[in-house]
Image (tube, rainbow, N blue to C red):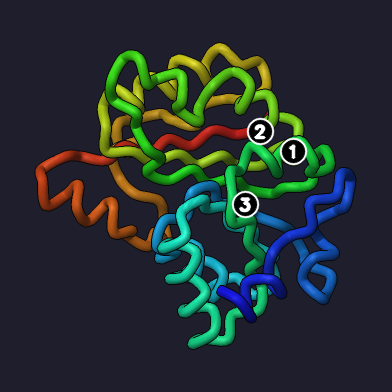
């Protein structure tokens, strides 16, 4: 945390294009918000070395865990924002992100807490601005109410289309998917995840 994290933390500078944060000209930049233990982020980064990845996570334990994996496997294409993603999103240039993941976010289940859910009109506006035309936004949750919440709000946006033609498109995980610890817990407790994919128009 003292030595490696400062070298991987993204600069909070408005307008700086994230392609320049990796020490080479990344073909594209993908963003994962709330990476938890980093299982998914480190797997896709290793599978796509030509792409730069930004991971946002506000909990110290998750940041420490992914730093250990990055160091152990010498993963060079991940940069971190160890704080609230909503601090970073307004600073990213328009159309600078090629894919966005929000996987198993805190569901804030109580009615009075739901205003804290990350999927909100303001977040959707940020996502629409930073994503390139044609880019994918992938959202996963094991909470039925949260999948319905997200779908209702995304369908109101004129900037996204839901890519679903059959139930397999939201009940089966994506190709190349790496199961997170949150998903493993959900399956042990007989909760069925939903996998929603939206495309920026």
The Cα–Cα distance between marks 1 and 3, rounded to whole angstroms, is: 10 Å
Task: Work out whether residue 21 or residue 110 is closer to the camera in this orientation and state it.
Answer: 110
Q: Which mark is residue 130?
A: 1
Q: Residue furthest front?
A: 2
Q: Which mark is residue 127?
A: 2
- Residue 93, quarter of the rendered image: top right
Q: Residue furthest right?
A: 15
Other-residue count near label 1 (Cα within 10 Å), few / some / many at <14 / 14–19 / ≥20: many
Q: Are marks 1 and 3 in contact (CB under 8 Å)?
A: yes
Quadrant, the N terminus = bottom right
Q: Position of residue 18 (x, y in %)?
A: 79, 57
Q: Are marks 1 and 2 in contact (CB under 8 Å)?
A: yes
143 displayed left or right of 89:
left
Q: Can you say whether 139 is above or below 52 in the image?
A: above
192 displayed left or right of 139:
left
Q: Which mark is residue 31?
A: 3
Q: Residue shown at 46%/54% (left/top)?
A: 59
Which of the marked residues, 3 or 2, is nearer the chain's N terminus?
A: 3
The Cα–Cα distance between marks 3 and 2, rounded to whole angstroms, is: 10 Å
Q: Position of residue 167 (x, y in %)?
A: 30, 31
Q: Are marks 3 and 2 in contact (CB under 8 Å)?
A: no
Q: Residue shown at 64%/75% (left/top)?
A: 49
Which of the marked residues, 1 or 3, is nearer the chain's N terminus?
A: 3
Task: Work out whether residue 9 or residue 51 is closer to the camera in this orientation and state it.
Answer: 9
Secondary structure at badge 2 equals helix
Q: Residue shown at 37%/43% (left/top)?
A: 104
Quadrant, the C terminus = top right
The Cα–Cα distance between marks 1 and 2, rounded to whole angstroms, is: 5 Å
31 displayed left or right of 92:
left
């Amino acid at each position: 945390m003292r030595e490696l994290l400062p070298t991987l933390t993204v600069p909070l500078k408005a307008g700086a294009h994230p392609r320049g944060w990796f020490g080479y000209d990344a073909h594209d930049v993908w963003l994962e918000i709330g990476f938890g233990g980093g299982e998914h982020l480190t797997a896709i980064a290793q599978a796509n070395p030509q792409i730069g990845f930004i991971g946002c996570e506000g909990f110290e334990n998750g940041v420490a865990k992914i730093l250990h994996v990055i160091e152990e496997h010498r993963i060079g294409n991940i940069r971190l924002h160890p704080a609230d993603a909503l601090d970073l999103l307004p600073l990213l240039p328009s159309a600078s992100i090629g894919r966005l993941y929000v996987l198993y976010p805190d569901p804030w289940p109580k009615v009075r807490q739901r205003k804290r859910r990350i999927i909100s009109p303001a977040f959707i506006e940020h996502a629409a601005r930073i994503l390139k035309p044609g880019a994918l936004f992938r959202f996963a949750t094991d909470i039925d109410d949260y999948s319905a919440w997200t779908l209702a709000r995304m369908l109101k946006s004129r900037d996204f289309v839901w890519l679903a033609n059959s139930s397999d498109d939201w009940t089966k995980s994506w190709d190349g998917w790496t199961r997170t610890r949150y998903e493993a817990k959900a399956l042990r407790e007989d909760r069925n995840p939903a996998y929603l994919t939206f495309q920026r128009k």
